[in-house]
Each structure stands twice: as C-alpha cells, then as structure tokens.
Image (cartoon, grey):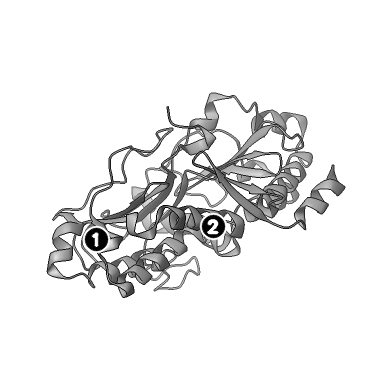
Amino acid sequence: MKRLRILLLIAAVISVTSAGWTYYRNSTAATALATAAEGFLDTLSAEQRTIAQLPYEAPQRLQWHFIPLETRKGLQLRDMTESQQAAAHALLRSALSQLGYEKATRIMSLESLLHELEGANRRFARDPLRYYFTVFGDPASTAKWGLSIEGHHLSFNFVVEGDQVVSSTPQVFCTNPAEVKNENQTGIPVGTRILKDEEALAFELVNSLTSEQKQAAIFDATALKEVREPGTPQPPQEPAIGLAAEHMTAAQQKLLRSLLEVYAGAMPAEVADARLAAIDSDGLGTVHFAWAGATEPGIGHYYRLQGPSFVLEFVNTQPDAAGNKANHIHTLWRDMHGDFGVPLQ
C-alpha cells in the first residue's frame, strides 16, 4: 500500500468534472492526504485513536465551526506528544498548499496574542495547540474517507475516495486581529496581516467600480455582522446577487480572478486548479460580486463572490482584541453543489 501510494504520488494529474462534482484522478493531493493520514494515525495509542478516528458515517463529520468551542470532535494537538504533533502538522501540510499552511499556522499563533491582549477579560481558552484532527473512515482503503482539521478561526474538511479528492469544503480562514496594531510580547510584528490579499484586492475591486456598477454591486450600506449560516452542513442556496463579472471591464475581471486565486490558492495545486477550472467552465462572467458596508478600512465591510459552483464570503465588522474597530476577519469558501461530498437534494 505504501509503495502504491508513492507511485500514485508521482503519477500524472488528470482532473475531470462529472455531474457537478470535481474529481482529481491520480492526484498528488489525494495520495499525499492518505499517506499523511495513515502516518498520523500510526503514531497514536489505541486510546488516542478512538478519539482521532471515527467511522465515515459518524454524524460528527458534518459538524464544523470556527468560533471558540469548549469541546470539539477529534484529538487536539495539546494532547499529543511532540512526534505526534509533527505527524499532525505533516497531515495539515498535505491538506493545504505551502501558502495555505503558512496562513493556517500563523492564525494558530495568533491565539498566543489573543491570550495576551485579552488578559483578565478573557472569556475563552486561547491556545495555539487547541486544534483538533479527526479522520473519518480508513485512509488506507479505496472507500470514501474524510478528514477534519479545526479549531478557533480554522476549519478544513475533505473527502477522499481512492485516488480522488471529491470534496474540500467548507474551507475557513479567519484572523483576529486582521492587522496587528499593538506592541506585544509574543514576537508577532506590528503590521502583520495574514489575510491581507483577501481584503486589499476586494477593496481595490469595489473602488474601481463606476457609480452605475456600484449600484448593482453594493446591496446594503451596512455590512452583515457575520458570514451566512456558519456551522450548517450545506451552504445557503440563495441566488447570486450583486454585479455580474460580465458587466466588468477587463481590468476589473483580472482583479476578480486574482481574488479568486487567493482563496483557491490555499489548497493543493490540483484542488485549486480544479476549482478555477470549474469557474472557467461556467464562465467568469457568471460570477457575481456583492458588497455591503464601507468601502474603506476601519469600518465594517462584507463581500460575497458567487458562481454556479461556489460561494465565498468575507466579513470584517468586529473589533479586535485590543478594541480596534473592524479588525477581525472571517472568510469561507463553500461548494454550491454540496459540502462534505454530500450532493444537494
């Protein structure tokens, strides 16, 4: 099995789309995930494995959230040995691109900053080791198996079948603070912006719009307080709103494409490429850009990008832990055909 996975790992990548679902044949993403998941599970004790590995059909597979929670499914880094933590990080690295992995680990490190900034006002445990790993099913088999890696401000969810990644959503990256504005003892530099491109490119796009385009794109003067329906097994099915890309200039469409690539680029190359290929297949012109709230930093703002195959949302309305206004970002990418590899009915 190990040798077979290594051979598959170097096989040519061929992606195809069938019935609205994107598959990655002979995918390095699928084989790397399976190999890393097997390696992680092999490091665990029997007791740890009962926590970290659940049946594929377990209802916990469809449970997810990025807010602070007292308990979550899976085995947390805090309860692992150093070698087990290394294996868990290898699994996380295999699930994301290098850029995505760097974003994820930097978001984890912000827990130490939150612990410091919140001080006596702290309501939740802030711990960079409070992130949980769950494997659903058997990654060594050709049957479907799933993976969840989750904690405060992160949620990654995958389904693999044989040598195919069949689902990679919900995908969540969040950051508090969005920009580090206060001197601190953690070593995180002032000015750090982990999700900078997700915000800056969107501001550039909305502020490039003409007055007529803004009438179509901006649907509310007040930003939504939160992304829609977080924690639900499937994404909201409301029709797309806002300005269709077919009514944008070539320069604006280029900005839109760059923004999409930032979100997709957090995933392994095959997953990212397949997401973008699905968007291209539907036509970039079908993607809608919707905005609510201020069009400048420091005041609450929200945007949504939606096409037939996906919806992504960004919200920045909450103050950060030091009280700086609109300095706390939540982002997510969801599959309009169905999250968790579960087709919509």
- The numbered mark, 2 or 1, whose residue comes first in the sequence reads 2
Work out whether residue 113 can be spotted. Answer: yes
Which numbered disc covers residue 272? 2
Residue 40 lies in quadrant: top right
Relative side of 273 to 121, left or right: right
**9 or 41, which is in the foreground?**
9
Residue at (40, 65) in percent of width and height: 257
Residue at (58, 59) in percent of width and height: 101
- Name which residue type carries label 1: Lys
Q: Name the spot of residue 45 as percent of width and height, x first.
A: 77, 34
Mark nearer the viewer, 2 or 1: 2
The 10 Å Cα crowd at callout 2, few under 14, some 14 to 19, many 20 or more, is many
Which numbered disc covers residue 300? none
Look at the numbered disc 2 and give the secondary structure of its residue: helix
Which quarter of the rendered picture does the C terminus lie within? top left
**110 or 118, which is in the foreground?**
110
Q: Name the spot of residue 325 as percent of width and height, x first.
A: 24, 61
The 10 Å Cα crowd at callout 1, few under 14, some 14 to 19, many 20 or more, is some
Look at the numbered disc 1 and give the secondary structure of its residue: loop
Which numbered disc covers residue 325? 1
Task: Tell me how far mark 2 sits from mark 1, CA to CA.
Answer: 33 Å
- Name which residue type carries label 2: Ala
Q: In this view, does 300 lie above or below 333?
A: below
Residue at (49, 65) in percent of width and height: 186
Q: Name the spot of residue 192 as percent of width and height, x first.
A: 43, 70
Residue 66 lies in quadrant: top left
Q: Name the spot of residue 58 as percent of width and height, x first.
A: 58, 24
**232 or 211, which is in the foreground?**
211
**250 or 204, which is in the foreground?**
250
